[in-house]
Amino acid sequence: MEMNSDLLAYMELISNTGFPIVISLYLLHRMEKKLDALVSAIQDLSRAFQ
């Protein structure tokens, strides 16, 4: 049921803002998660050298 409501929310967002904007927001969200993981890995590496 949750997946269906998420899909409807995405469809409404696409119809209101346009496809390119939605894709840009999705990609930025994915990149933010990867950057957070990278920062965490660098901090762990820094602690390992201390």
Image: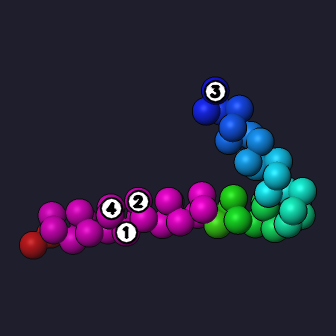
CA gap, disc 3 to disc 4? 36 Å
Amino acid type indicated by mark 1: Val
Q: What's the magenta region?
A: 29-48
Which residue lies under the disc numbered 4? 41
In this orientation, which residue lies closer to the viewer: 28 or 39? 28
Q: Is residue 6 magenta?
A: no
> Which SS class for mark 4?
helix
- Which residue shows up at 85% across the image and 56% down it? 14
Is there a contact, CB below 8 Å, between mark 2 and mark 1?
A: yes
- Which residue shows up at 32% across the image and 64% down it? 40
CA gap, disc 4 to disc 2? 6 Å
Which residue lies under the disc numbered 2? 37
Other-residue count near label 3 (Cα within 10 Å), few / some / many at <14 / 14–19 / ≥20: few
- 1 over 50 or under it: above or below: above
Task: Look at the image and tell me in which quarter the C terminus lies.
Answer: bottom left
> Which tag is nearer the camera, tag 3 or tag 4?
3
- Tell me, for residue 1, which label it has, or none: 3
Which residue lies under the disc numbered 1? 39
- 13 over 8 or under it: above or below: below
Is there a contact, CB below 8 Å, between mark 3 and mark 1?
A: no
In this orientation, which residue lies closer to the viewer: 42 or 28? 28
